Amino acid sequence: MDSLLRDRFSHFFDIGARLFFALTIFAIPFRWRVVIWQRPFFPLYSDYTDYLLFASDLSMLYMLLFWACSLLINPRKLRVGPSLMWVSLLGLTVAGWVSVFGSVDGILSRYQAVRFVPLLLFYLFIVNEIKSAGWVVVPVGAQILFQSEIAILQVTAQRSLGLQSLGELSLNPADLGTSVIFGDGFRFLRGYGLSDHPNILGGCIAFGLVLLLTVILHGNKRARIISSIVFLLCFPALALTFSRSAWLSFFVAGSFMVGGEAFARRWDSVQRAILLGMLSLLIVAPFIQKNNLLFQSRVNSGNVAQDAPMKERAFLLEAGNTLFVEHSAIGIGLGAAALAMRERFVEFPLNFQPPHYAILTVAMETGVLGGMFYLLALAIPFVTIVLRWELFSRRPALMGAFALLLAMTVVGFFDYYTWSYSYGRIWQWLGWGLYSAALESAA
């Protein structure tokens, strides 16, 4: 092939791969899916056992196809990022395959193990091909802005908006199974957007706001203004999801970023953050004041002992720990946590589901080895930032990537979707990829 023609084809596939990468990020929260194989296991939620392909899965597959074509036309050596992170993610993928041999549903675990391979390639694509923050921040901003406005309209109308063709659930606060907040004699619909659950949407918005905050603190003037506008438009939706894990994750990650700026004495950035915080609170204050009882019931004034969702989580943790102890060698099978709960426990007062603690769910499904690799992947950025703080404090991309991982780690203490669902997995592997790419670039 003529070298000029080869370069043109390679450029075409490179751009196509990046565009599908951006589309993958934009599509993360969408619950729209293709059902490949329905596998009902009453009374389990069908998403736990069905073969599904989400919009983000399909766009990721096209991204990898275009990237493969580019590599075939223009072969080049691939980097794997920091060695410890690569070993952790590769080991986690292998542990998922090994878990198939001890799975309570080998067919399901094999399918989930296959899905982990594109995630590993997704990580490699980010490390090798994403050189500009714009390829991440722009689709993230578009993602949360689109989802946030839909969520705000849903809460305002207290019903779905008729967007079922895009994957919207049929939402009615009077229906059982719909996620609501209980007020004084009424049920108040939480913001779903086009996601499967308000907690998932809340996490996506929180993660997106963390990345926008990075731009607001460190970007050029134009980027700061645009990011600030999108931030202020999306912040009310974060409140309206009533997701405590999302609230906490954003607060922790945002506080870390602003604290880092104060520690480095970059007072102009701190002033921008303070102004942004004041405007954000000013925007949501009228709604909080109007619905004070709803927010009080969600915050619960710290009375965890009387908090039904927290008691349910405690029960699931105990059940999950039992399964982990009994199957610690290679686990009960990747993606099979809910089914294993049904098989193991005859008396179960809740819906069968994984424990709301990602690390335990990982260890339960993939055994000790998988749990160790996952924990190592989570811990590496924390250890590195302590040892190389000076480098991190001078590199906005590193600080933003670490803050994103910090936010997802916080969510993982209270929920399992960063491991069990396609939405959370793509965010998690995106965070690891951005961190590894930023660290390599800074070296």
Image (cartoon, rainbow, N blue to C red):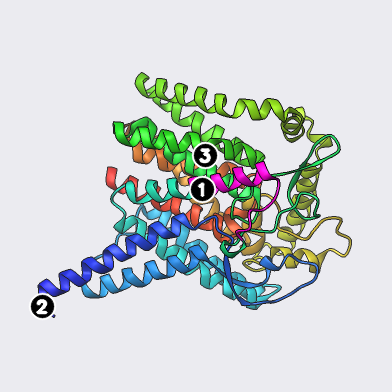
Separation (CA) of disc 1 from disc 3: 28 Å
Residue type at mark 2 is Asp
The answer to if 128 sits in the magenta stretch is no
Count of marks placed on residues: 3
Residue bearing the label numbered 3: 234
Residue bearing the label numbered 1: 378
Mark 2: secondary structure? loop
Compared with residue 409, is residue 36 higher up or lower down, i.e. above or below?
A: below
Separation (CA) of disc 3 from disc 2: 49 Å
Q: Which mark is residue 2?
A: 2
Question: Which residue does the image show at 67% across and 28% down from the upper left?
Answer: 288
Compared with residue 253, is residue 180 higher up or lower down, i.e. above or below?
A: below
The answer to if 159 sits in the magenta stretch is yes
- Asked whether the viewer can see residue 409, the reply is yes
Residue type at mark 3 is Cys
Range of the magenta residues? Answer: 144-163
Q: Quadrant of the N terminus?
A: bottom left
Front-lying residue, 22 or 378: 22
Percent coordinates x, y for residue 7 in the rendering: 16, 69
Compared with residue 163, is residue 104 higher up or lower down, i.e. above or below?
A: below
| CB atoms of marks 1 and 2 within 8 Å | no
Front of the two marks 1 and 2: 2
Mark 1: few/some/many CA within 10 Å (<14, 14-19, 20+): many
Percent coordinates x, y for residue 222 in the rendering: 30, 34
Which of marks 3 and 1 precedes in the sequence? 3
Percent coordinates x, y for residue 49 in the rendering: 68, 70
Mark 3: few/some/many CA within 10 Å (<14, 14-19, 20+): many
Q: As drawn, is 3 to the left or to the right of 323?
A: left
Residue type at mark 1 is Leu
Front of the two marks 1 and 3: 3
Which of marks 2 and 3 precedes in the sequence? 2
